[in-house]
Image (cartoon, rainbow, N blue to C red):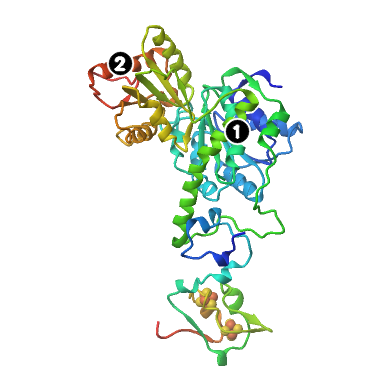
């Protein structure tokens, strides 16, 4: 039986970790994810888990610990943010290409510089092409639910890829909300035993992990990795189906909010979706045909599905909480616009970079985006495509 | 189980192991890395005193020893680094002239 508790997003992740009881945690603190290893260290000290907690001297080492543990045949976890994720960068690629099903909790935060500890998605988005599955949460309940589903997705034999479970730093990582927790036995039953086919501690089978790949093999291994990422789509939906059967809570690649007859829509990731839903409700009450798509799974990117969800819209604003410095839009915009290209007739698209370094977003800000979309849909005038929300400027 | 001997430069991607994992030991025996070599050492057996100093110096274990005596170079694995030439106190190893 599930029960209610009030937890911060970080604590919710730590509770899910306790319930899973993984074999090894590589632990290093960084704001705003520090509480995750902190809570978890308490569980270790209290004997509530059998996990080996390895406190290391950097995130480069915490991810290395995870890789060694996963290659040895264990379940391995870590948590990080911002510069910590950046320091793991080299290992992220090695973990994915070595096909190690590690789960990393990311409380997203701006990357320096200028130095800033508040939320945006520049850390996780910077790692988007590392070969990791990336699942984002709107609120504390979702980050808990996503975490419970992570290992079964990562360990699916056709997938064997590491997973990042992302939540918005401070906004959900530190805000306390009521959430519905599963019982420990339910989580253990859902996640199951981990029995990898090949692992270093198997004395009956000598194993080499991550050998040097000469030119004649490297591309074939990258092709395998790319196929594994495609396979992850089915695994994500399969675990969502099992999770819904257990909890009644429904998950997919993205959530469509009041999209049935929507003519103007916003595409967004993370906690801002909550603010945007409230705005949609306000505008719907005025008779406006507005809707919202909240992207949950960014890697693998659900391009075809997203195109189907948006194809009836007249105007769409894609909101990026990271600056990609491509000089033509953020990463979510680039993916979404690419996904829509194959449609016979497409909505007009604009990109709004917003909320960087913890800049607040209110329903008023979101309403202004819908107003801009409405004007665009009425006049067909797109104007400037790539814009920044709420930036002070001389006009 | 996929064996290293069955994987070669014409294998389709489906036949490779995930991440290039190798499920058996000593597969370097199957793989010719000697073709990375640009210079080749030559063993002059008549000058050799069988002191075996060259053997532990070779970074590629390319000097086989049998019954307490070194034999011909394992040119499938020798990289031609020349360390053995420097290590040999009796000038029993020289570069191959033609190269
Ligand atoms: S170091 Fe020279 S003399 Fe000694 S075993 Fe090697 S080749 Fe022979
Ligand atoms: S040249 Fe280098 S690799 Fe070749 S046998 Fe001598 S020491 Fe070993």
The lab-note entry on whether marks 2 and 1 share a chain reads yes
Q: Tell me the quadrant of the picture where the C terminus of chain A can be found.
A: top left
Assess disc 2: are there few (<14), some (14-19) or many (≥20) residues with their C-alpha within 10 Å of its C-alpha. Answer: many
Q: Residue furthest top?
A: A286
Q: Residues within 10 Å of mark 1 (few under 14, many from 20)?
A: many
- Specify the subunit that label 1 lies on: A
Residue A347, position as x, y percentages in the image: 31, 26
- Give the camera-side residue of A7 and B54: A7
Q: Residue furthest front?
A: A344
Q: Cβ of disc 2 within 8 Å of ligand 2?
A: no
Position of the N terminus of chain A by quadrant? top right
Residue lying at 46% horizontally and 73% vertically, measured from the top left:
B35
Q: Earlier in the sequence, mark 2 or mark 1?
A: 1
Q: Secondary structure at mark 2?
A: helix
Residue positioned 51% across, 41% down in the render: A132
Quickly name the residue at label 2: A374
Residue A1 placement, left or right of A368:
right
Q: Is residue A315 above or below residue B99?
A: above
Farthest residue toward the right? A47
**Residue A321 screen position, x and y as percent:** 41, 27
Q: Which type of secondary structure does the marked residue at label 1 adopt?
A: helix
Q: Chain of mark 2?
A: A
Residue A124 at x, y = what percent?
47, 35
Q: Is residue A32 above or below residue A288?
A: below
Q: Which residue is label 1 attached to? A: A149
How far separated are the C-alphas under marks 2 and 1? 38 Å
Q: Quadrant of ligand 1?
A: bottom right
Most foreground residue, B67 or A232: A232
């Amino acid at each position: 039986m599930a029960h209610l508790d009030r937890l911060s997003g970080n604590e919710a992740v730590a509770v899910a970790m306790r319930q899973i009881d993984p074999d090894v945690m590589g632990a290093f603190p960084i704001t705003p994810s520090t509480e995750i290893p902190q809570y978890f260290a308490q569980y270790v000290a209290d004997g509530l888990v059998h996990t080996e907690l390895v406190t290391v001297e950097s995130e480069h080492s915490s991810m290395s610990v995870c890789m060694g543990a996963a290659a040895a045949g264990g379940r391995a976890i870590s948590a990080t943010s911002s510069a910590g994720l950046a320091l793991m960068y080299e290992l992220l690629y090695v973990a994915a290409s070595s096909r190690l099903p590690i789960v990393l909790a990311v409380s997203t935060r701006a990357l320096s510089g200028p130095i800033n500890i508040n939320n945006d998605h520049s850390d996780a988005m910077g790692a988007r092409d590392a070969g990791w599955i990336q699942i984002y949460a709107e609120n504390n309940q979702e980050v808990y639910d996503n975490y419970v589903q992570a290992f079964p997705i990562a360990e699916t034999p056709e997938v064997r890829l590491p997973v990042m479970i992302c939540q918005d730093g401070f906004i959900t990582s530190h805000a306390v909300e009521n959430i519905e927790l599963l019982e420990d036995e339910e989580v253990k039953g859902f996640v199951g035993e981990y029995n990898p086919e090949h692992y270093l501690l198997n004395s009956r089978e000598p194993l080499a992990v991550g050998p040097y790949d000469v030119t004649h093999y490297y591309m074939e291994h990258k092709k395998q990795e790319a196929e594994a990422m495609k396979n992850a789509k089915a695994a994500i939906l399969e675990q969502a189906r099992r999770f819904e059967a257990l909890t009644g809570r429904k998950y997919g690649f993205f959530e469509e909010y009041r999209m049935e007859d929507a003519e103007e829509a916003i595409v967004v990731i993370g906690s801002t979706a909550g603010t945007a839903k409230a705005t949609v409700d306000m505008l719907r009450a005025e008779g406006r045909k507005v809707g919202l798509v909240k992207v949950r799974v960014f890697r693998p990117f659900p391009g075809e599905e997203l195109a189907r969800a948006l194809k009836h819209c007249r105007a769409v604003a894609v909101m990026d909480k990271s600056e990609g410095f491509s000089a033509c839009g953020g990463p979510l915009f680039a993916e979404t616009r690419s996904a829509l290209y194959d449609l016979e007739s497409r909505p007009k698209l604009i990109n709004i970079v917003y909320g960087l370094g913890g800049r607040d977003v209110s329903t008023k800000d979101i309403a202004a985006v819908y107003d801009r979309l409405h004007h665009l849909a009425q006049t067909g005038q797109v104007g400037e495509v790539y814009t920044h929300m709420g930036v002070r400027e001389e006009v | 189980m996929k064996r290293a001997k069955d994987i070669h430069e014409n294998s389709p991607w489906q036949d490779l192991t995930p991440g290039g994992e190798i499920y058996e030991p000593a597969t370097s025996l199957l793989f010719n890395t000697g073709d990375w070599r640009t210079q080749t050492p030559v063993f002059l057996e008549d000058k050799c005193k069988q002191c075996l100093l060259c053997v532990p110096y070779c970074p590629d274990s390319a000097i086989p020893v049998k019954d307490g005596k070194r034999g011909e170079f394992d040119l499938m694995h020798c990289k031609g680094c020349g360390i053995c030439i420097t290590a040999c106190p009796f000038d029993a190893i020289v570069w191959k002239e033609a190269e």
